[in-house]
Image (tube, grey):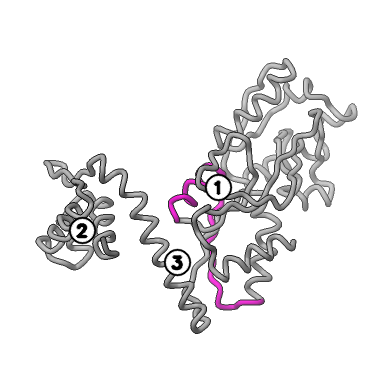
């Protein structure tokens, strides 16, 4: 099994067609077919079924595909990392996944210092929910993920290094009517207009906050994956949202937002660095990780 066979297998799987794959790869269809047949013979497994709807993966093909993707990605990462060590080339791209809390504070500072220390470094940052980012990490599409370690996350094949303890509170604007009589309790907050991040796991955790205290779960007024929408909506109207202090640090410091610890005990979660357990970080990835630890 060589890299060319693996790349051809992935291309056929992605396109669902030997004809289109041959065109993209700039090879003849007979050559592509022989390459796949040789791979099947080596693995003693049929990878595709041909039919009216093109080339469909078999169960064996489905099993191989995510591993084949990792092999290709790791090969490209290895080549870029070695090129960087040989001559300081800037071809290596560090793919990072991050949640909103790291995206607003710690990661930008680390990237700024990294760019100053190593102008040849190149980054690709994806912001999203932890579950999706960890899946991309397992598949090799990301090399580092920054986020909170929630108890419901699947950490199979992943190592977690805690960097900070995140504290979450109820966020609302400084002039919110609920603050007129002092600090409202959770019962009063259950009647408020809630903004909840658009992740099923976070919605479930937010719901349990009320259920554990014998309160009805309020309707969600706004559900969105956009931190920008959440922040500006909080500042514009009479809404409340559960959020990490680091995510809203600037608005809390200038007094535009108020944080309420309406739940006892306080809601805290470890946050830090996720990486694949079976992969060695490149020199640049290790340098970025060191900057994140030092923040």
Q: Secondary structure at mark 3?
A: helix
The x and y percentages for residue 126 are: 53, 55
Depicted 4 relative to depicted 167: above or below: below
Span colored in magenta: 117-140
Q: Which mark is residue 21?
A: 2
Q: Secondary structure at mark 2?
A: helix
204 relative position to 67: left or right: right
Depicted 216 relative to depicted 257: above or below: above
Q: Secondary structure at mark 1?
A: loop
Dot 1: few (<14), some (14–19), or many (≥20) neighbours within 10 Å? some
Residue underneath mark 3:
77
Dot 2: few (<14), some (14–19), or many (≥20) neighbours within 10 Å? many
At x 24%, y 61%, the residue is 5
Q: Earlier in the sequence, mark 1 or mark 2?
A: 2
Locate the C terminus by quadrant: bottom right
At x 63%, y 46%, the residue is 227
View extreme (bottom): residue: 87
Residue 39 vs residue 293, the one in the foreground: 39
Asked if residue 138 lies in the magenta stretch, the reply is yes
Residue underneath mark 1:
128
Dot 3: few (<14), some (14–19), or many (≥20) neighbours within 10 Å? many
Give the spatial CA distance, label 1 vs label 2. 31 Å
Depicted 127 relative to depicted 56: above or below: below
- Decide: marks 2, 3 in contact (CB < 8 A)? no
Asked if residue 85 lies in the magenta stretch, the reply is no
The quadrant in which residue 191 appears is top right
284 relative position to 238: left or right: left
Give the spatial CA distance, label 2 vs label 3. 24 Å
The x and y percentages for residue 21 are: 20, 58
The quadrant in which residue 1 appears is bottom left
Q: Earlier in the sequence, mark 2 or mark 3?
A: 2
């Amino acid at each position: 099994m060589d890299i060319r066979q693996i790349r051809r297998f992935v291309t056929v799987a992605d396109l669902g067609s030997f004809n289109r794959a041959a065109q993209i790869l700039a090879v003849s269809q007979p050559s592509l077919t022989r390459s796949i047949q040789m791979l099947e013979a080596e693995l003693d497994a049929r990878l595709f079924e041909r039919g009216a709807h093109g080339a469909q993966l078999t169960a064996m093909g489905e099993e191989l595909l995510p591993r084949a993707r990792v092999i290709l990605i790791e090969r490209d990462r290895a080549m870029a990392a070695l090129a960087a060590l040989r001559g300081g080339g800037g071809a290596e791209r560090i793919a990072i996944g991050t949640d909103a809390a790291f995206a607003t504070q710690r990661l930008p500072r680390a990237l700024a210092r990294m760019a100053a220390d190593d102008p040849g470094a190149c980054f690709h940052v994806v912001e999203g929910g932890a579950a999706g980012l960890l899946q991309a990490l397992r598949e090799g599409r990301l090399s580092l993920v920054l986020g909170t370690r929630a108890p419901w996350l699947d950490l199979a094949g992943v190592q977690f290094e805690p960097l900070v303890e995140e504290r979450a509170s109820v966020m609302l604007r400084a002039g919110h009517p609920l603050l007129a009589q002092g600090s409202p309790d959770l019962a009063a907050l259950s009647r408020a207009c809630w903004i909840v991040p658009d992740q099923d796991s976070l919605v479930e955790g937010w719901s349990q906050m009320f259920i554990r205290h014998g309160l009805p779960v309020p309707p969600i007024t706004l559900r969105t994956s956009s931190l920008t929408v959440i922040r500006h909506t909080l500042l514009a109207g009479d809404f409340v949202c559960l959020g990490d202090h680091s995510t809203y640090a600037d608005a809390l410091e200038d007094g535009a937002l108020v944080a309420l610890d309406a739940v006892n005990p306080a809601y805290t979660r470890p946050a830090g660095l996720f990486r694949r357990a079976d992969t060695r970080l490149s020199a640049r990835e290790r340098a970025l990780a060191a900057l994140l630890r030092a923040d």
